[in-house]
């Protein structure tokens, strides 16, 4: 099997498993049990992980990190926790957001909040899928209090210019939230530059365990963010999320993020080259294979590792196989693990809302497949996957 669905989830790195094992065998106490040393040690492991993750994303304080069950819960906590302090107002987001952003915002819309989902640049544009800042400025109203923009899209890999978006939000006194599930561990993240107020991310996108994530909350400095807890019970997670802490998951989360940041520039280049080789091979044998989303860029390494301007996730490829049905093509190549879009919408028969937001008709959406390359993919994997897909496509044609 060749696994190319790394946007849905990733294999847990064996080094992460090794870091987690002691929390099952030795450090298994409840971290809230402050009356004995085993509970205190479990608590200390969580706080060490919190500090490590805060440092990795350049948070001002470890208290800015709230552990959750994943980015979906983080998104819900951010939106509802902020909205319940106001009871009304206007929120801006983007049409290509993940369902875990769209659904809770739509629910707030039914509760009296006004929600605006902005369009993105269409297919054919070198920055397809990005937000037009003029449209953002035009959408802002007197009661706009939050803007939520995904850092990197999970289907088409578009990387938004958060720097510019943050400037607009700061200019108008609006909170900025970003779903960075696909960006943390794959891009250079500094929550101070651009200044974001809230950021959601998960461990299982970066070779860590499922069931654990975090919400960065700017709790310190100028105009700190205040949220209302959405899960009541104990006072875990600084009073913002009740429930027994997931010690193994949190320890694995910190280990996974640390590993992802090792040699990040080289890994970005490696994945982008493999991605481009895959697309070129498909084009060589099948003819035109149009790309959905922004261009397949590989910025010049000399540009600078800290500010390298990627416009697309290095490991992302979303393309069309004209005249074919994407699902049928995947079935004909069962050894290659692929998807047509977000795993959260895999049971939905409706065409991808992300691809439709680019202006693609249903036929072009249905002939599209998403490739998510990752750490454990090799050049040999990509060559074999291309061969299998080419053979399957030719048999269908």
Image: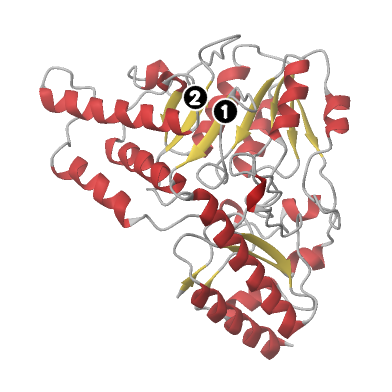
Give the residue displayed 68% in from the left and 52% down from the top: 312
Q: Is residue 7 visible?
A: no
Q: Is 23 situated above or below 198?
A: below
Give the residue displayed 33% in from the left and 32% down from the top: 49
Dividing the picture into quadrants, the one containing residue 322 is bottom right
Q: Is 140 situated above or below 324?
A: above
User: Mark 2 — residue?
Assistant: 59
Residue 383 on image: x %, y %? 56, 79
Q: Nearer the viewer, residue 174 or 111?
A: 174
Mark 1, residues whose alpha carbon is within 10 Å: few (<14), some, or many (≥20)? Answer: many
What secondary structure is marked by label 1?
loop
Q: Give the left or right position of residue 128, taking residue 181 as reference.
A: right
Q: Nearer the viewer, residue 223 or 55?
A: 55
Give the residue displayed 69% in from the left and 33% down from the top: 162
Residue found at the very far bottom of the displayed protein: 395
Q: Nearer the viewer, residue 58 or 340?
A: 58
Mark 2, residues whose alpha carbon is within 10 Å: few (<14), some, or many (≥20)? Answer: many
Q: Are marks 1 and 2 in contact (CB under 8 Å)?
A: yes
Residue found at the very far front of the displayed protein: 302
- Quick one: quadrant of the N terminus? bottom left
Residue 57 on image: x %, y %? 50, 32
Pick whichever of labels 1 and 2 is earlier in the sequence. 2
Q: Is 91 situated above or below 202?
A: above
Residue 62 on image: x %, y %? 41, 22
Q: Nearer the viewer, residue 118 or 171?
A: 171
Q: Which mark is residue 191?
A: 1
Dividing the picture into quadrants, the one containing residue 27 is top left
């Amino acid at each position: 099997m060749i696994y190319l669905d790394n946007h849905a989830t990733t294999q847990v790195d064996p080094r992460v498993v090794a870091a987690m094992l002691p929390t099952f065998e030795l450090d298994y106490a409840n971290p809230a049990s402050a009356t004995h040393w085993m509970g205190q040690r479990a608590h200390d492991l969580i706080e060490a992980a919190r500090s490590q993750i805060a440092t990795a994303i350049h948070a001002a304080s470890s208290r800015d990190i709230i552990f959750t069950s994943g980015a979906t819960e983080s998104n819900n906590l951010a939106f509802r926790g902020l909205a319940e302090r106001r009871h009304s107002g206007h929120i801006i987001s983007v049409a290509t957001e993940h369902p875990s952003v769209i659904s809770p915002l739509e629910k707030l819309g039914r509760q009296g909040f006004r929600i605006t989902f902005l369009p993105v640049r269409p297919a054919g544009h070198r920055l397809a899928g990005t937000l037009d800042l003029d449209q953002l400025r035009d959408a802002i109203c007197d009661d706009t209090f939050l803007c939520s923009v995904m850092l990197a899209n999970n289907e088409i890999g578009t990387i938004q210019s958060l720097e510019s978006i943050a400037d607009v939000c700061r200019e108008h006194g609006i909170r900025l939230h970003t779903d960075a599930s696909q960006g943390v561990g794959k891009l250079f993240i500094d929550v101070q530059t651009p200044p974001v107020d809230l950021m959601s991310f998960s461990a299982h996108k970066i070779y860590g365990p499922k069931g654990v994530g975090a919400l960065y909350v700017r709790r310190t400095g100028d105009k700190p963010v205040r949220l209302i807890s959405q899960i009541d019970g104990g006072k875990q997670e600084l009073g913002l999320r009740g429930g027994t802490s997931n010690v193994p998951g949190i320890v694995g989360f910190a280990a996974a993020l640390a590993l992802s940041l090792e040699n990040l520039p080289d890994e970005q280049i490696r994945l982008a080259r493999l991605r481009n080789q895959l697309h070129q091979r498909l084009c060589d044998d099948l003819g035109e294979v149009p790309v959905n989303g922004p261009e397949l860029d590989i910025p010049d390494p000399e540009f600078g590792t800290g500010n390298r301007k990627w416009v697309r996730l290095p490991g992302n490829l979303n393309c069309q196989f004209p005249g074919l049905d994407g699902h049928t093509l995947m079935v004909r190549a069962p050894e290659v693990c692929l998807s047509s879009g977000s795993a959260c919408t895999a049971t939905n028969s409706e065409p991808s809302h992300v691809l439709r937001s680019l202006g693609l008709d249903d036929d072009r959406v249905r002939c599209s497949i998403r490739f998510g390359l990752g750490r454990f993919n090799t050049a040999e994997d990509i060559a074999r996957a291309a061969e299998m897909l080419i053979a399957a496509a030719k048999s269908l044609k």
